[in-house]
Image (cartoon, rainbow, N blue to C red):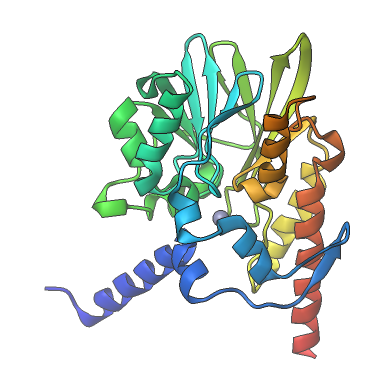
Amino acid sequence: MRTRSSLNLLGCLLATAAFEAGAVYAQNAPPPDHPSVTVKGQTYTPRSILARNMGSDADQTTQFPPHKVIGNIYYVGTKTLSSFLIVTPQGNILMDSTYERNVPVIKKSVEDLGFKFSDVKILLGNHAHGDHQEGDAAVKQLTGAQVIVMAEDVPALQAMKPGGKEHPIDKVIHDGDKVTLGNMTLTAHLTPGHTRGCTSWTTTVQDGGRSYNVLLGCSLRPPATISPEVAAEFERSYKYVRTLPCDVQVGDHGAQYNMLEKYAKLKAGGPNPFVDKANCFLEADIEEAMFHAIMAEQAAAKK
Ligand SMILES: [Zn+2]
C-alpha cells in the first residue's frame, strides 16, 4: 500500500515533470511579462520569448514544410519545435524527437524528403525537456536507433516517461565528445543553464563546393527565478557558446534563428538564407540580456 508521503512525492515529481515539459508551463502558468530587454530594436519579456518559442498548441504539432537547411542537414520539425535530419551514406542522425505525439509528423517529414525513417541510426537530443525529447522512446521503437545523451541530462531524461515507457539511453556522453556516423562528425558542447545537460552541437557540412560550420544551439533561455548554481552555469555558457565556429546557426525552436523569415527567403530563391554568420549569436545576445535583467530584478527584490 502506498503511504501518504510517497503519494505526495509522486505528485511532486509529476508536477515537476509537467513543468519541465513546457506545455503546462506555456498554457497554465505563463512566465511574467517583466523584465523587458531590447536587443537590435526588438523588445522581449520572459512571456514573449516563451510565446515566440512555442506558438499555439497547433503550431507545436503541425508539420512545417520539411526543407534542406544546408549540405546534408534537413529540417523535419513542426512549426515551432525543431527536429533535424542529418543524412549520411551509412544511415541518418535525428536531432530531437520533440513531443511523443509529433513522432508521426517527423516521420512524415523525413519521408516527404525522400528518406526512410528506418534509416535513422542515431538519435541525439538538444536538452531534457518534453518538447524536445519526449518522443525518444517512440523513435527508438520505430527505428531501433541508438539513443545518445549528455551525462548531466540523464536524471531529467529518466524522469521523462510518456505512457510509463522507460526513456531509452544507449550511450552517455560528456562535454567535448564526438558522435560519428558515415562522413559526419558532430561535437557535443555542454552549454548548461536551461537544463543541466543542455547540449549545443557543432559540425561541418559541404555545400556548393564550400565548407560551412553549423551550430545546432541549445536553448539559453533563463527561468523566471535563477538559483546561484544555475546563474554560474549560464554565465559560463553565454561566454562559451560565442567561441564556437559558426556560419549557420539553428536552434531547438525555429524562433531562435528566425526560421520563418529565412524559410520565406529560401522559397524566394537566391543565396542560402540560413548562412547568416552575422546573427550566429543573436539568440545568445537576447537570452544573456534577459538573464542579466532577471538577475538585477532578483537582486533588487532582496534589498
Ligand atoms: Zn526547454
**Residue farthest along the left direction in this orientation:** 1
x 55%, y 50%: residue: 80
Q: Is residue 65 left or right of residue 100?
A: right
Q: Is residue 187 visible?
A: yes
Q: Can you say whether 182 is above or below 247 in the image?
A: above
Q: Position of residue 10 (x, y in %)?
A: 30, 70
Q: Position of residue 89 (x, y in %)?
A: 51, 9
x 78%, y 73%: residue: 36
Q: Is residue 104 left or right of residue 290?
A: left
x 38%, y 53%: residue: 160
**Residue farthest along the bottom direction in this orientation:** 303
Q: Nearer the viewer, residue 45 or 125?
A: 45
**Which image quadrant is residue 264 in?**
top right
Q: Position of residue 191 (x, y in %)?
A: 68, 46
**Which image quadrant is residue 106 in?**
top left
Q: Can you say whether 101 is above or below 172 in the image?
A: below
Q: Quadrant of the N terminus?
A: bottom left
